[in-house]
Image (spheres, rainbow, N blue to C red):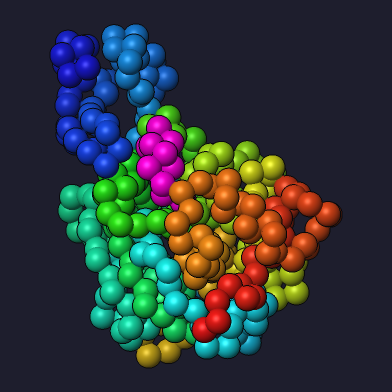
């Protein structure tokens, strides 16, 4: 592809060996005067065995709120009063993580960046890690934090599809079972392939459905068949008004005005981003899933231990219902 791309006016920007996914990724700059679909068609015609896609942007799915409500998430999910022990290491693909945050004192965190240039603010990734590592939920936590948000535009922070692919490759090569992706964006062929390879290697990917509202098509990676798609509800079990809906939705968790430790204080956070790590934590606490390598097994376990919020069975608003941590561990 490198020769064909150069001949057609494409500039090779990067070549990455993705050993964890058994892939090689090439990043090109397109020549002027050509559209993305035209470039994809031309390159795939030159190299029929290749998978070509635009380097789409993926965005965080969270907002902060001044509303001061009770810390209801643990009680709603019926976490054991003393919390549970994490059965496996977890991966987080997000912004950076402030490892000096007091909320993360008890966690072991390994971080790596997947972009060049200055890092974006680390608040979102730190929030996600704080939910995962809260001693009231999980103890003995190990997190592999992949920082993919090195870009910003008028709409806020964004991560390229290439950064997500590199992050999945890293986590596939580490001793990680569950991977939290509190981000969303458009369908991307390269990300689709990377997710497929990651799932085939035993990673269980848990992703936010997104906050673009109930009338949009599925966002990704939550829209992929091999990914656990998480939506958000409030303290009364009502769906978060901006949550994406559809047949891909698997499970719901608290995601409206959820209390999150922030330095020496707390914040209240809303969005499918903050519901997602609550589900990831519930999975990581479950001894019956410690050796799970199949997303089908995880879905069956979630379905069997959830509380229905909508029609009987799986539905496009709540999925299987509210994720419960009741009886997951004995403390």
Give x and y (percent) for residue 291: 45, 57
Of residues 55 and 284, the one nearer the viewer is: 284
Instruction: State whether residue 181 is above or below residue 285.
Output: above
Of residues 105 and 126, the one nearer the viewer is: 105
Q: Residue at x 18, y 53 (%)?
A: 117
Give x and y (percent) for residue 261: 44, 83
Q: Determine if the magenta segment contains residue 318.
A: no
Give x and y (percent) for residue 175: 30, 57
Give x and y (percent) for residue 200: 42, 39
Q: Residue at x 74, y 50 (%)?
A: 314
Of residues 42 and 153, the one nearer the viewer is: 42
Instruction: State whether residue 3 is above or below residue 247.
Output: above
Instruction: State whether residue 295 is above or below residue 104.
Output: above
Instruction: State whether residue 13 is above or below residue 211.
Output: above
Magenta: main secondary structure equals: helix
Give the magenta-colored segment's residue range.
193-205
Of residues 274 and 23, the one nearer the viewer is: 23
Question: Left or right: where does residue 64 sit relative to residue 238?
Answer: left
Q: Residue at x 24, y 63 (%)?
A: 111
**Quadrant, the N terminus:** top left
Q: Determine if the magenta segment contains residue 200.
A: yes
Q: Does residue 291 appear in the picture of this structure? A: yes
């Amino acid at each position: 592809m490198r020769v064909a791309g150069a001949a057609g006016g494409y500039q090779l920007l990067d070549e990455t060996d993705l050993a964890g996914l058994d892939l090689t990724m090439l990043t090109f700059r397109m020549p002027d005067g050509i559209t993305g679909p035209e470039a994809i068609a031309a390159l795939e015609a030159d190299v029929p065995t290749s998978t070509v896609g635009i380097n789409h942007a993926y965005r965080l799915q969270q907002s902060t709120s001044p509303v001061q409500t009770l810390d209801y998430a643990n009680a709603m999910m019926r976490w054991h009063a003393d919390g549970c022990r994490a059965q496996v290491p977890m991966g987080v693909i997000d912004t950076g993580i402030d490892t000096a945050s007091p909320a993360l004192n008890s966690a072991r965190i390994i971080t790596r960046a997947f972009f060049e240039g200055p890092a974006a603010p680390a608040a979102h990734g730190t929030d996600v890690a704080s939910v995962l590592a809260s001693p009231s939920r999980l103890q003995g936590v190990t997190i592999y934090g992949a920082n993919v948000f090195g870009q910003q535009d008028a709409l806020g922070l964004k991560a390229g599809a290439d950064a997500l692919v590199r992050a999945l490759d890293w986590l596939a090569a580490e001793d990680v079972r569950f991977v939290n992706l509190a981000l969303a964006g458009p369908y991307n062929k390269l990300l689709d392939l990377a997710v497929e390879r990651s799932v085939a290697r035993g990673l269980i990917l848990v992703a936010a459905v997104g906050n673009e509202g109930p009338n949009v098509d599925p966002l990704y990676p939550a829209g992929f068949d091999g990914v656990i798609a998480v939506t958000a509800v409030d303290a009364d079990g009502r769906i978060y008004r901006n949550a994406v809906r559809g047949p891909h939705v698997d499970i719901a968790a608290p995601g409206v005005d959820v209390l999150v430790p922030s330095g020496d204080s707390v914040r209240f956070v809303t969005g499918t981003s903050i519901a997602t790590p609550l589900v990831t934590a519930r999975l990581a606490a479950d001894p019956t899933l410690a050796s799970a390598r199949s997303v089908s097994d995880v879905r069956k376990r979630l379905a069997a231990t959830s509380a229905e919020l909508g029609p009987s069975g799986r539905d496009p608003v709540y999925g299987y219902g509210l994720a419960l941590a009741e009886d997951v561990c004995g403390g």
